[in-house]
Amino acid sequence: MSGQGSSSDPIDPNTPPISSQTNHHTMNITPHTNRRNVLKLLAASTAAPLILPRRMFGADAPSNKITIGCIGVGWQGAENLNSFLGLDDCRVVAICDVDDKHLKEAVNRVNARYNNQDCKSYKDFRELLARKDIDAVCICTPDHWHSIPAIAAANAGKDIFCEKPLSHTLGEGIAMVNAVTQNKRIWQTGSWQRSVASFRWAVQLVQNGYIGKVTRVEVGLPSGHADFEGTGKDKPNGPVPDGVDYDFWSGPSQLLPFNPCRFHKNWRWNYNTGGGQLMDWIGHHCDIAHWGIANPQYGCGPDDAVGPLEVSATAEFPNKEDIWNTATKFRIECKYPNSIDFVIAGGYDDIQGGAKWIGPDGWVQVDRGSFKASNTDWIREIQKLDKKDDLKVSVYKSENHHKNFLDCIKSRQRTITPVEIAHRSQTPGHLGHIAASVGRKLKWDAVKQEIIGDADATAMLTKKMRAPWHI
Ligand SMILES: NC(=O)c1ccc[n+]([C@@H]2O[C@H](COP(=O)([O-])OP(=O)(O)OC[C@H]3O[C@@H](n4cnc5c(N)ncnc54)[C@H](O)[C@@H]3O)[C@@H](O)[C@H]2O)c1
């Protein structure tokens, strides 16, 4: 199937409603049942075969594939696209990018994969979102371009896979959570470490009390800047490359003169569009660190929507006018509920990369490619228990991040990294940046999501968007 059928569904309106009795429940399929609901019903039917009318197959059939449109197909966007192209239960039907080169490459890859010419190109995400036959979108634009398309997608009834960090400002994150929740959308964040076994094992050890009640958490992130595009950091402003809509690329951020050093990939090193190493990595290692303390017995749960109570920070910033002006070194010291000291640092030797939890009975540390604990027996033991699903406190298990998203679209259950979790994971990063900028300790009301008694710091929770863009 091409996946081009409408989700408000070409089922013959004369088809009478049918019921199919399974072992567990009755399914009602009516002429108004759309493709997404059929997928949901099929996912819920476990035992008895479901009897469907003949016209639900063949030319009149609702697609049994989840249709996806990808918005932003640069570096990570191409990775996510490849992941979706590798999964059978979805169909990528549309690509949107404001750079012709990236757009064409991605469309060609989709058409080559499906051996047809069906994939449609868009330069304006609003046109893609207007398509009724698209079930879900994958948003992989730079950080300054997450909130607007994500909120528009939620309002358009799409399920959403969106990259970390959730948003460019904390205020945008709150608006995204509200839009996704109010529209009852399924959301997956690109924080894929949650779907990697070693990160889960580390979290299982902490949540199952191996180290006792957590007293300290350390999150180690990279420092400096990394030249991802090979542009260096001080090229002169230059002409906009052919095929790029630079005004659209700049979108809600300030329209600066075009400079190759703050364009593709390296946009992260300028606060106009990104948040430096701190915000680039907060959605990975701080996300895992929060997951570990999401148990009230040993951490400060009950879920990982936890937040700091106090935040102090220092950072080394280049000149504001520099092309790469994001902090090169930073240290954020937070107080979490249950007196947990929570440190996030980049450029400090005493804080190892990844996430580390420390308690009275030992420690656990995990990073990409390393998983260590104060007691090495725990490492073997937790893997065995995880395999048998024999843990007192079980944690969400996903072994394929993109598949988890598709499965949840069908079941309408929460993904492993829903929007509110991603928002809480980025929160100490935004607050740390603000605390370092104003140079004083912040008090945070994690329930109301307000900085207490500091107007200047509060003003930094949001940023004026360039007209006509707004949320
Ligand atoms: N999960 C991960 O491991 C991981 C890794 C890298 C990047 N990321 C995240 O992915 C996102 C993209 O980062 P990147 O490194 O791929 O950036 P990139 O610059 O390589 O790609 C961004 C793409 O978005 C396009 N774009 C910009 N504005 C657009 C708009 N309004 N509509 C459509 N397309 C638009 C650009 O032209 C470009 O093709 C960021 O949020 C980043 O933090 C996540």
Image (tube, rainbow, N blue to C red):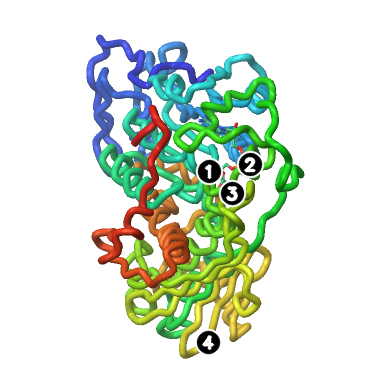
Pointer 1 residue: 273
Identify the mark nearer the N-term, 1 or 3: 1
State left or right for residue 398 relative to residue 155: right
Q: Secondary structure at mark 1?
A: loop
State left or right for residue 114 relative to residue 404: right
Query: Type of residue at label 3?
Result: Glu
Pointer 2 residue: 262
Identify the mark nearer the N-term, 1 or 2: 2
Mark 2: few/some/many CA within 10 Å (<14, 14-19, 20+): many
How far from the left and from the top, in percent, is residue 413?
35, 47
Q: Is residue 220 above or below residue 275?
A: below
* For discs 4 and 2, the disc positioned in front in the rendered view: 2
**Residues at marks 1 and 2 touching, judged by CB atoms closer than 8 Å:** yes
Rendering quarter of residue 445 = bottom left
**Residues at marks 3 and 2 touching, judged by CB atoms closer than 8 Å:** no
Query: Type of residue at label 1?
Result: Thr
Q: Secondary structure at mark 2?
A: helix
| C-alpha separation, residue under disc 3 versus residue under disc 2 | 12 Å
**Total marks drawn?**
4
Query: Type of residue at label 4?
Result: Gly
**Residues at marks 4 and 2 touching, judged by CB atoms closer than 8 Å:** no
| C-alpha separation, residue under disc 4 versus residue under disc 2 | 43 Å
Q: Secondary structure at mark 3?
A: loop
Pointer 4 residue: 362
Q: Nearer the viewer, residue 301 or 59?
A: 301
